[in-house]
C-alpha cells in the first residue's frame, strides 16, 4: 500500500521572510497578496492567531476572518437536520421568530405562532447536538 508523501510544514520564519520580501518590494498601499494571507492562515494549526498577527505585523481581525473562511471552504458538505415538533396545545395568539447560525454556517430558523409550549432552550440545544 502506497503512502502519500508528507506535506512540507511551513514555518513562521519562512512566512515572516516572505512578508518582509513583499514589504521591501511593494508599491505604496498595495494589499497583501492572497498567497501571503494563505501562508499566514496555514500557521493557525501551530500558533495562536494573536501570535501570528503580531509576528507578521498583520491585522488580527483580518487574519482571524481568513482562517475562518479557510475552514469553511474545507467543510463544503452541507448537512441538513430535521426533527418534528409537537403540535401547539393552544390556539394561536402571538408570533415568535428565532434564528441561529454557528461559525460553520449551520442555520436554524424557528417560527412559532400562538402560545409557545416548547422549551426553546432545549430545542436549540437539540439542534446544535444533531448538526455539529
Image (spheres, rainbow, N blue to C red):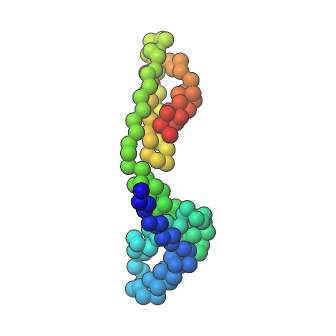
Residue at 38% over, 45% down: 77
Q: Residue furthest top?
A: 90
96 versus 132 height, above or below: above
Residue at 49% over, 11% down: 89
How far across and how far down the image is residue 16, in percent?
53, 79
How far across and how far down the image is residue 59, in percent?
53, 69
How far across and how far down the image is residue 28, in percent?
41, 84
Q: Residue furthest front?
A: 1
Residue at 42% over, 80% down: 29
Taking depth in this image into account, of 106 and 79 the one nearest to the observer is: 79
For the image, the number of numbered tags is: 0
Q: Residue furthest bottom?
A: 24
The quadrant of the image that shows the N terminus is bottom left
Quadrant assignment, res 44: bottom right
Residue at 46% over, 47% down: 104
Taking depth in this image into account, of 104 and 8 the one nearest to the observer is: 8
How far across and how far down the image is residue 63, in percent?
50, 65
Residue 75 in view (yes/no): yes
Residue 40 in view (yes/no): no
37 versus 64 height, above or below: below
Amino acid at each position: 500500500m502506497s503512502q502519500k508523501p508528507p506535506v512540507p510544514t511551513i514555518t513562521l520564519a519562512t512566512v515572516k521572510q516572505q512578508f518582509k520580501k513583499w514589504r521591501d518590494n511593494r508599491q505604496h498601499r498595495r494589499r497583501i497578496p492572497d498567497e501571503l494571507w494563505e501562508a499566514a492562515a496555514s500557521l493557525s494549526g501551530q500558533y495562536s492567531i494573536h501570535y501570528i498577527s503580531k509576528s507578521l505585523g498583520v491585522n488580527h481581525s483580518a487574519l482571524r476572518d481568513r482562517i475562518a473562511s479557510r475552514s469553511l471552504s474545507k467543510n463544503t458538505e452541507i448537512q441538513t437536520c430535521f426533527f418534528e415538533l409537537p403540535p401547539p396545545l393552544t390556539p394561536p395568539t402571538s408570533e415568535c421568530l428565532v434564528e441561529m447560525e454557528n461559525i460553520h454556517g449551520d442555520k436554524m430558523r424557528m417560527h412559532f405562532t400562538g402560545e409557545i409550549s416548547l422549551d426553546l432552550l432545549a430545542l436549540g440545544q437539540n439542534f446544535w447536538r444533531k448538526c455539529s
